[in-house]
Amino acid sequence: MGWEDTPALDWTVDDVRSWLEFHGLKHLEVLVCNKNHVDGKTLLMIQEEDVRRPPLQLSTLGDIKHFMYYVNSLKGTQKILNQDVRVSLGLVKSTSFQTEASTAGESSSSESESESHGSVNTANILPSLLLCSSCSSKSRSSRSNISSRLEPERWKTALALMYILCVSWLTAITMTVVHDRVPDMNKYPPLPDIILDNIPHISWAFEMSEVAGMTLLIIWCIVLLFHTHRFILARRFFSISGTIFLLRCVTMLITSLSVPGVHLDCKPAPYGAWTERVHAAYVIWSGAGMSIQGVRTCGDYIFSGHTVSLTLLNFFITEYTSRRIYFLHTFTWVCNCFGIFFILAAHEHYSIDVFIAFYITSRLFLYYHTLVNNRTLFRSHQGQDSKRTWFYFPLFSFFEQNIDGRVPNEFSLPFSLEQIKNHITRFSCRFSEISESISGRPRTKSRSKST
């Protein structure tokens, strides 16, 4: 039985030599067979980069392309259904075997049908499929971009909530510190600003920026409430916002800018004792630093916390709602842009404060989601990128440890009807037990008195 009737997996070196001679590549026998001892398995695993590099390193482009053409044709004619063998030969990846197996099954069925009606030259069809392997891999990657594990991990969400609460309290403490260091307005006038110098002061503008922020917050709470993966979304929101405001604490302490507007009554307010400072920090923390809550702070200019909140809420709403809801995304972007404009029109921040806040918030949001949606970082936990991620983004690596892809935008009720019925039944049973125990106490007392 010659090499034509033998599967390529069982070819010997002599069979490969005969195969080369059949395809007019006899001049490659010494290099391929005598020096490198290429048999059938080795031939099926050869890639073009192997032909271009030592020890093969074919010298002419024609030999390289002809050799790889016939190798790819050989791969296409081999019907290998064993998963382990296909993975070992590098023909498929272990994670995508099912997809390619189904594709192979469909192609084999179509081939059998075509053969029943007439002969088909599979050697001419399958190389074209191999040339489009990159296209199929892209389609598979787009379909498999959804994370395979979407566990809520409520305890991580609780830790993220504690993280943002601690950072918000630290931010309030930092605001009281920078208020003590605010420069004297008589000695340090407002700095030149190309935008503030050309926009007149609007007294009610800052309150309007906070109204825009509250509108975005209400929308985000509704999205978060009805999103199926609400705990994952809340964990990401808490971790990203906490990290940004923690960075803001550092920038506020490093540099104290002069007051941006002459209408502001900002003077250093030294606190006599730490109890007074803690009370002032509690007022800022309980009012979320908002002027509509009666909070007035000075010195916290680099960078704008209001811009951070507006931008972050806008990005989260647009990311975790359907792309087809154009009016919602347009509305959130309008709120974001007009909120930033109102901050500048109120002369509460310099333009550089707003620009830095928007840039840092948008970049951190995009970097975070790019990393978590890139599945290749999680396929090898020993890779250099993985180690670098653990070092520079420890919170990201901890909170997103079990997420290996994109979170789908799916919505559902927070509680199903069955869960609501179960809660009502448990509550009624518990209430009846308590009422019976309370009504039974005086009877026991009366009985004890009669005895």
Image (cartoon, rainbow, N blue to C red):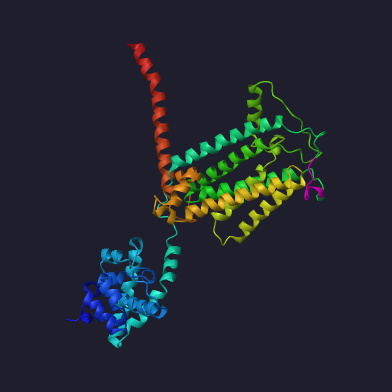
Q: Is residue 164 visible?
A: yes
State the residue at coordinates (81%, 45%).
201
Q: Is residue 416 visible?
A: no
State the residue at coordinates (71%, 31%).
181
> Which secondary structure type mostly characterizes the magenta part of the structure?
loop
**Residue 269 belongs to magenta span:** no
State the residue at coordinates (55%, 38%).
164
In the depicted structure, whether residue 208 falls above or below residue 145: above
Q: Which residue occupies the extreme bottom position in the image?
A: 118
State the residue in front, 35 or 289.
Answer: 35
> Which segment did they paint magenta?
190-197
- Image quarter for residue 306? top right
- Image quarter for residue 191? top right
In percent of width and height, residue 436 lies at: 39, 27
In the depicted structure, whether residue 275 falls above or below residue 79: above
Q: Looking at the figure, which quarter contains the N terminus? A: bottom left
State the residue in front, 130 or 67.
Answer: 67
Q: How many marks?
A: 0
In percent of width and height, residue 250 lies at: 62, 37
State the residue in front, 308 or 363.
Answer: 363
Q: Looking at the figure, which quarter contains the C terminus? A: top left
In percent of width and height, residue 246 lies at: 58, 39
In percent of width and height, residue 200 lies at: 82, 48
